[in-house]
């Protein structure tokens, strides 16, 4: 009569057991009630198309091209701030209003340059007509044209200065028509994005180019991943990256469902060329495509790098695998009991392992109780 032994005793006996004590063949003949007494739980191997390669920490960052500092184009007094941290803003939206005496001077210079241009334009048209009729000399026409071009350049320069200061084309045109100077300057958002930081307060006096806001477009985010240098050879450009979902999915794991990950698509786009001397890691970058609500800039998160698998692979619990003589085995249920089937472990993911084996995925395998089955396989645990 066979009796189940505690796992610690079985482990010691298995470690001392010589290879010659193996039962003939890989078949373990067990009755159904005996299987139940051994505490064996049945489940299925889950087919997978990707192999886990590496767990690593990562930091979520905004690409440099997607981040902007909104600054005051003129020195002045901050009248009001219209956006707070976390607000979504659109391109051209007014973020702040400044009262600037420098803006008054710039407007005055533009109006003067525009008046000079109108005067020179009249002279230009007049002398163009006269030179075509042969009334005036060519030299006079050339002088008039030169003065007109200089006036046009000066007016264009001052108009661009107003645009740089933050005035829109409609506001500049309104200034020409009304000739009414205003020191109120609207600071607008250069992009569609989210306010990441507010760098000024209402009522403060700011200098020209003083930062007011930091805005980022979050349609694309990067993951900066620290990879141990000895593992770099296993990682390739284009490898997929999964972000772990922190929370209680124990019930799903118990039910042997696929490990839960956030619905985020990311892939390795860069492998660094230098090693961090402090921790001997290499920076890798993964690009997250599409706007995300589950991750945020500055967040630190655990990730897993996976690679596509061209062969047949399955995921099983670590408890389903038994080691013997340097090889790995799982136990497949049949009519007589179980068959010990050799497998190759090609990756691990938390409580699960990815194996390569000649399975169809429909077989029932022992997902717990592998130690007891191994003992029976080797002829241990009997009187």
Image: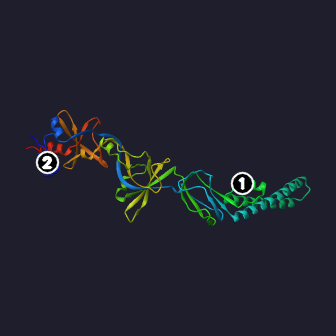
x 90%, y 53%: residue? 133
Does the rendering let one see residue 150? no
Name the residue tied to disc 2. Answer: 19
Q: Is residue 209 above or below residue 315?
A: below
In the depicted structure, whether residue 98 falls above or below residue 377: below
SS type, badge 2 = helix
Residue 222's disc is none
State left or right for residue 305 relative to residue 167. left
Residue positioned 17% across, 49% down in the render: 7
**Residue 149 in the image, given as x and y percentages of width and height:** 78, 59
The nearer-to-camera label among 2 and 1 is 1
* Residue 126 in sight from this viewpoint: yes
- Outermost residue toward the top in this view: 335
Along the polypeptide, which appears first: circle 2 or circle 1? 2
Badge 2: few (under 14), some or many (20 or more) residues near its Cα, within 10 Å? few
Q: Position of residue 87 (x, y in %)?
A: 55, 53
Q: Residue at x 38, y 47 (%)?
A: 307
Q: Based on the displayed image, in which of its 4 quarters is residue 198 positioned?
A: bottom right
Q: Which residue is mark 1?
A: 171
Figure quadrant of the C terminus: top left
Is 24 left, or right, of 61 in this rendering? Answer: left
The residue at 89%/59% (across/down) is 137
Horizontal side of 222 relative to 346 (left or right) equals right
Which residue reaches farthest front? 203
Indicate the secondary structure of the residue bearing disc 1. Answer: helix
Mark 1 closeness class: few <14, some 14–19, many ≥20 residues within 10 Å? few
Q: Are marks 2 and 1 in contact (CB under 8 Å)?
A: no
């Amino acid at each position: 009569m066979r009796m189940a032994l505690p796992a610690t005793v079985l482990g010691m006996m298995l470690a001392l057991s010589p290879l010659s004590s193996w039962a003939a063949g890989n078949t373990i003949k067990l009755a159904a009630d005996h299987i139940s007494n051994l505490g064996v739980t049945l489940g299925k191997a889950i087919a997978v198309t990707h192999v886990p390669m590496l767990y690593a920490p990562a930091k979520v960052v905004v690409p440099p091209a997607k981040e902007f500092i909104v600054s005051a184009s003129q020195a002045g007094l901050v009248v009001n701030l219209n956006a707070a941290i976390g607000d979504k803003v659109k391109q051209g939206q007014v973020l702040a209003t400044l009262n600037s005496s420098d803006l008054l001077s710039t407007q005055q210079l533009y109006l003067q340059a525009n008046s000079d241009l109108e005067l020179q334009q009249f002279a230009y048209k007049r002398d163009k007509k006269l030179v075509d009729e042969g009334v005036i000399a060519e030299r006079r026409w050339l002088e008039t044209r030169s003065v007109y071009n200089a006036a046009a350049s000066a007016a264009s320069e001052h108009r661009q200065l107003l645009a740089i200061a933050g005035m829109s084309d409609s506001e500049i045109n309104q200034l020409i028509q009304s000739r009414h100077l205003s020191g109120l300057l609207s600071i607008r958002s250069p992009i569609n994005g989210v306010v990441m930081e507010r760098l000024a307060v209402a009522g403060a006096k700011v200098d020209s180019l003083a930062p007011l806001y930091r805005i980022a477009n979050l349609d694309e985010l990067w993951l900066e991943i620290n990879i141990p240098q000895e593992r770099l050879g296993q990682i390739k450009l284009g490898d997929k990256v999964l972000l772990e979902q922190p929370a209680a999915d124990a019930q799903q794991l118990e039910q042997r469902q696929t490990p839960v990950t956030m619905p985020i698509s990311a892939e390795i786009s860069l492998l660094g060329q230098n090693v961090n001397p402090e921790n001997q890691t290499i920076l890798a970058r993964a690009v997250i495509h599409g706007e995300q609500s589950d991750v945020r800039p500055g967040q630190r998160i655990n990730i897993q790098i996976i690679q596509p698998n061209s062969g047949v692979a399955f995921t099983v619990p670590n408890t389903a695998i038994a080691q013997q003589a340097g090889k790995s085995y799982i136990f497949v249920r049949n009519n007589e009991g179980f068959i010990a089937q050799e497998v190759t472990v090609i990756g691990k993911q938390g409580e699960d392992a990815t194996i390569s084996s000649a399975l169809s995925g429909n077989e029932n395998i022992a997902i717990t109780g592998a130690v007891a089955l191994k003992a029976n396989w080797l002829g241990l645990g009997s009187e």
